[in-house]
Amino acid sequence: MARKEKSAGSVRGVCPAAGRSGSRSEKSEMNEVYLQELLEQVSRGETAAGDALEELKELPYKDLGFANVDHHRAIRTGFPEVIFSQGKKPEQIRDIFRELMGRGRTIMATRSTPRDYAVVREVIPEAVYYDTARIIAVQAEENEAREPIGSVTVVSAGTADIPVAEEAAVTAELLGNEVNRIYDVGVAGIHRLLDRLGEIREADVLICVAGMEGALASVLGGLVDAPVIAVPTSMGYGANLGGLSALLSMLNSCANGVSVVNIDNGFGGAYFASVINRKGK
C-alpha cells in the first residue's frame, strides 16, 4: 500500500465573487455555503450576474464525451462523485480525475489497477494507490484536519476477506470517519471475536465482511447496539455460489439492526456507514 503523501500545494486561482486570489478549496468549493455566498453577493450588487454565471457553468455536470462528471453530487448527497474504474480505460479514469481536481474535495476511484494508477499519477503526482483496497485517491488537505464525522469498525471473518474489508476501511477513512480494523475473527473461532468485543462495542457503526456462509453478521448483530452493515464476499467453495450463500444468510439474519449491501461491495458498506455518521452529528 502506498503511503499517504502531502499535497504538492493548493491550486491558486481567482474567485469571481470577490475578485481576489485564494485557494480553490477555500473560495471555489462547490458546496451549499459557497453557492449561498455567491448568490448573496449578486443580490447585493457586489458581483456581476455574468461573473456568477461563468462560475456556475459547470454545474451540475461537465460533459467529457465519454462521461458526464457530476460536480453537483456533493451538494445533493453530501459526498462527491466516486469513480468506478472497472470497465473504464486508464486514460478515461485519468481525465475524470483531472476534471474533479481543484475543487477542494477528496477524489477517489474504486476497483482500480496498478496500470490505472500509473496513468493517473502521470498528471496527478500526489495521487495515492491503496493496493489491497484497489483504490486511487487524492485527499483534500482540509479533510485531513477535520474532526472525524464518527467511528467505523470494520470486522472481517477471514483473512481472505481482507481485500473487500480494506475497500470498506479506506473508503470510510477518505469519507471522514475514524476507522478501526479487526480482521480474521470469524465464527470458526468465536473466542477471537469475543476477545475484542469491548473494542467492537465502542464503534458508532460496524461493517461486517464475511464470505462462506456469512454467519458473522448475525453474531455481531446480536452483541452490539450499533448499526451493522453486512458485506457478503465471494470467498468460499462451490456452494458459496460466488457469494450468494453469504448474501442470502445475511438477508435472512434473525438479528435486529443488520442491513446488507451487494456481494464484495466494501465501498457501498462504507458509504452507508458514512451517511449514518454524518446524519447522526
Image (cartoon, grey):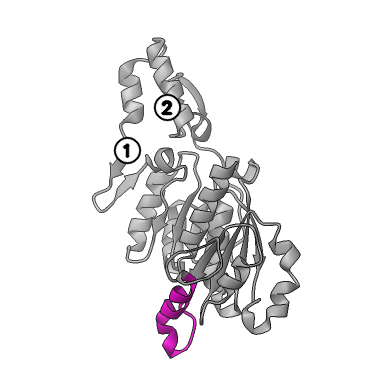
Q: Nearer the viewer, residue 135 or 129?
A: 135
- Residue range of the region highlighted in magenta in the rendering: 234-250
Q: Quadrant of the C terminus?
A: top right
- CB of mark 1 within 8 Å of CB of mark 2? no
How crowded is the residue under tag 2: few (<14 C-alpha within 10 Å), some, or many (20+)? some
- Looking at the image, residue 256 lies above or below residue 41: below
The residue wearing badge 2 is 35
Q: Answer left or right for 174 relative to 46.
A: right
Q: Residue at x 33, y 35 (%)?
A: 59
Whether the magenta-drawn stretch holds residue 248 is answered as yes
Q: Nearer the viewer, residue 13 or 135?
A: 135
Q: Which mark is residue 199?
A: none
Q: Residue furthest bottom?
A: 238
The residue wearing badge 1 is 60
The secondary element bearing badge 1 is classed as loop
Q: Residue at x 47, y 54 (%)?
A: 108
For the question of whether residue 8 can be seen, the reply is no
Q: Position of residue 68 (x, y in %)?
A: 29, 48
Location of residue 224 (image quadrant): bottom right
- Looking at the image, residue 91 lies above or below residue 236: above
Amino acid tagged 1: Pro
Location of residue 194 (image quadrant): bottom right
- The secondary structure that most of the magenta stretch takes on is helix
Q: Residue at x 35, y 52 (%)?
A: 95
Q: Position of residue 120 (x, y in %)?
A: 43, 57
Q: Position of residue 102 (x, y in %)?
A: 46, 40
Q: Quadrant of the N terminus?
A: bottom right
Marks 1/2: CA–CA distance: 12 Å
Q: Residue furthest left?
A: 65
Q: Nearer the viewer, residue 78 or 82?
A: 78
The secondary element bearing badge 2 is classed as helix
Whether the magenta-drawn stretch holds residue 91 is answered as no
